[in-house]
């Protein structure tokens, strides 16, 4: 499915589920796509619980560009896609939104605007690693601004750092680095357990 946004056409991969009461909507990282192994693992966890799954490709990726668009373009496109989905394909469903790396940041920044019931962050890029110069600014305020239940799944050797847990935020450490490829079964299991918990409340 292709959806027009203020910044180009987004592509949506929809996996509907009969009788679903919730949907997991996930975005990709800055330089990758929706076939990233951790996204596939998270989608599998959701499907095992009977959730619908939606994978969203940002317009810059659909247009064939690898360099990500500016943050406000990403946020506006994501919000437009969610509005379209809420009016049709996932109408009436509770929405868990999220993504990996840059996609997780988009989901956090737009959680209130999209009416998210919960947010899933895979490999949240807390602070870009730098070899020289002053340290980069932390993205922790983006996480702290999310008011709904949040899960961060982070590789214990992620060079972007380890976000702290928060009042409504759980942080799950798994083996591996920013790619979260070292222990995909662990990623899938922790996402499944968290989804089961947040959707039961």
Image (cartoon, grey):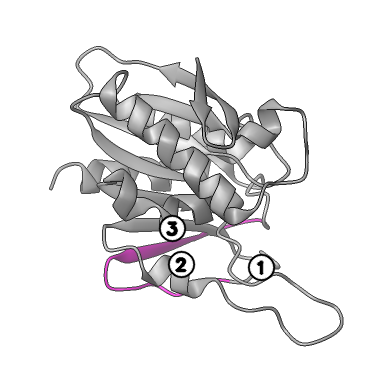
Gap in angstroms between the C-alphas marked 2 and 1: 15 Å
Residues at circles 2 and 1 in contact by the CB criterion of under 8 Å: no
Nearer to me, 95 or 193: 95
Relative to 105, does residue 59 appear above or below in the rendering? Answer: above
Query: Does the magenta-highlighted stretch encompass residue 34?
Result: no
Q: Badge 2 is on which residue?
A: 142
User: Which badge, 2 or 3, comes first in the chain's sequence?
Assistant: 3
Picture mark count: 3
Q: Which range of residues does the magenta coloring cover?
A: 162-176
Residue 184 rendering spot, x and y as whole percentages: 57, 41
Nearer to me, 201 or 141: 141
Bin the neighbour count of mark 1 within 10 Å (Cα to Cα): few under 14, some 14-19, many 20 and up.
many
Tell me which residue sits at (46%, 31%) in the image: 43
Q: Badge 3 is on which residue?
A: 109
Question: Is residue 197 found left or right of 160 in the rendered image?
Answer: left
Question: Is residue 186 found left or right of 199 in the rendered image?
Answer: right
Q: Can residue 101 be seen in this view?
A: no
Nearer to me, 133 or 75: 75
Give the structural element (helix, strand or loop) at label 1.
loop
Q: Badge 1 is on which residue?
A: 160
Tell me which residue sits at (58%, 77%) in the image: 138
Give the structural element (helix, strand or loop) at label 3.
helix
Bin the neighbour count of mark 3 within 10 Å (Cα to Cα): few under 14, some 14-19, many 20 and up.
some
Residues at circles 2 and 3 in contact by the CB criterion of under 8 Å: yes
User: Which badge, 2 or 1, comes first in the chain's sequence?
Assistant: 2
Principal secondary structure, stretch drawn in magenta: loop
The image quarter containing residue 35 is: top right
């Amino acid at each position: 499915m292709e959806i027009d946004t203020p910044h180009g056409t987004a592509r949506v991969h929809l996996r509907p589920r009969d009788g679903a009461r919730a949907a997991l909507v996930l975005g990709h990282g800055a330089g990758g796509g929706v076939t990233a192994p951790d996204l596939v693992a998270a989608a599998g966890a959701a499907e095992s619980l009977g959730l619908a799954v939606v994978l969203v490709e940002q317009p810059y990726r659909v247009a064939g560009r690898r360099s990500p668009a500016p943050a406000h373009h990403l946020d506006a496109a994501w919000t437009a896609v969610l509005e379209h989905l809420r009016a049709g394909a996932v109408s009436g469903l509770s929405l868990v939104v999220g993504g990996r790396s840059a996609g997780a940041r988009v989901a956090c920044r737009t959680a209130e605007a999209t009416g998210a019931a919960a947010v899933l962050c895979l490999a949240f890029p807390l602070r870009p690693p730098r070899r020289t110069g002053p340290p980069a600014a932390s993205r922790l305020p983006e996480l702290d601004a999310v008011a709904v239940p949040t899960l961060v799944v982070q590789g214990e050797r992620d060079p972007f750092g380890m976000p702290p847990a928060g009042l409504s935020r759980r942080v799950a450490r798994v083996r591996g680095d920013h790619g979260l490829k070292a222990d995909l079964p662990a990623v899938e299991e922790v996402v499944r357990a968290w989804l089961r918990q947040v959707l039961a409340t």
